[in-house]
């Protein structure tokens, strides 16, 4: 019983966290987060003009040739099917694993599960080598405050968080989150909520 109550409070806490967090996650930055992993685990054989398997990861121009296109090791958006993620995720005993199995290559360490998951997430997000202009870290931090007007003409300054059933979730100064009935907003604010929810 006690555990059940604990679990329930955990789920409620998680639901609130989801509600409060901004909807747009910051995209994974290749240079900051992915390149160091590749450098650590793959560059030994996949850098320089004599890179193995015609897969050169240390030069963006060269690496980009194997992302999408005719002979891809990465298919943007396909984290599960991309050859690079598949090979990096194979058990060390598998002859196709990357780095090559210890019997063939001693001293080369595979990606950790956390590293592989990050790489997969990056592929799922489109495997961009350049930082995305749509979601730079600064812009994602500074959410826009809108003016909301209800049917009685009362104004409220708040960030848009999301829509929840018949409510619009808004975040006011001091991070106070409220669920406001959609029907009580004036037409203009209803249209604004619709537009922001679709973004
Ligand atoms: C010790 C050397 C070595 C390391 C380290 C290494 N690789 Fe390789 N890789 C190779 C060799 C050799 C080939 C070509 C022959 C083969 O496919 O087994 C290759 C081929 C590949 C290919 C296939 C390219 C193609 O078009 O066929 C992929 C994908 C790949 N490696 C990914 C990785 C990743 C990801 C890492 C880092 C986690 C990595 N490799 C680390 C030696 C290495």
Image: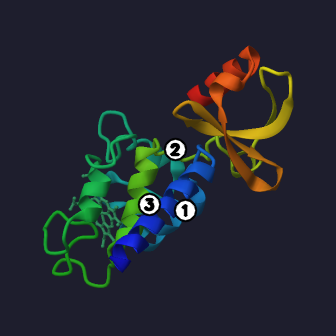
> Seen in the image, is 23 located left or right of residue 191?
left
| Residue 25 on image: x %, y % | 57, 48
Q: From the viewer's perspective, is residue 181 above or below residue 106?
A: above
Check disc 1 and report the residue beneath it: 33
Instruction: Name the foreground residue: 146 vs 94.
Output: 146
* Mark 2 Cβ and ligand 1 under 8 Å apart: no
Which element type, helix, strand or loop, lies under badge 2? loop
Check disc 3 and report the residue beneath it: 118
Q: Where does the C terminus fall, quadrant-wise? A: top right
Check disc 2 and report the residue beneath it: 128
| Residue 173 on image: x %, y % | 83, 50
Query: What residue sits 17% from the left and 63% below the top?
Result: 96
* Mark 3 Cβ and ligand 1 under 8 Å apart: no
Instruction: Name the foreground residue: 173 vs 178.
Output: 178
Instruction: Name the foreground residue: 179 vs 20.
Output: 179
Is disc 3 surrounded by few (<14), some (14 to 19) or many (20+) residues within 10 Å? some
Q: From the viewer's perspective, is residue 65 above or below residue 181?
A: below
Residue 98 picture quarter:
bottom left
Viewer can see residue 79: yes
Label 1 with label 3: CB-CB less than 8 Å: yes
Residue most extreme to the top: 187
């Amino acid at each position: 019983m006690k555990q059940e109550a604990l679990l329930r409070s955990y789920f409620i806490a998680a639901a609130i966290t989801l509600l409060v967090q901004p909807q747009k996650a910051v995209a994974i930055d290749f240079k900051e987060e992915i390149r160091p992993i590749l450098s650590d685990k793959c560059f030994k054989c996949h850098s320089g003009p004599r890179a193995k398997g015609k897969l050169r990861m240390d030069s963006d121009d060269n690496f980009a040739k194997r992302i999408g296109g005719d002979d891809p090791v990465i298919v943007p958006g396909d984290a599960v099917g991309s050859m690079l993620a598949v090979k990096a995720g194979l058990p060390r005993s598998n002859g196709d694993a990357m780095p090559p199995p210890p019997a063939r290559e001693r001293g080369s360490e595979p990606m950790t599960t956390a590293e592989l998951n990050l790489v997969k997430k990056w592929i799922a997000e489109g495997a961009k080598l350049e930082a995305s202009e749509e979601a730079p870290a600064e812009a994602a931090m500074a959410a826009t405050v809108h003016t909301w007007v209800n049917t009685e003409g009362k104004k409220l300054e708040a960030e848009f968080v999301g829509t929840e059933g018949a409510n619009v979730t808004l975040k006011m100064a001091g991070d106070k989150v409220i669920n406001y009935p959609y029907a009580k907003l004036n037409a203009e604010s209803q249209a604004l909520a619709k537009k922001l929810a679709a973004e």
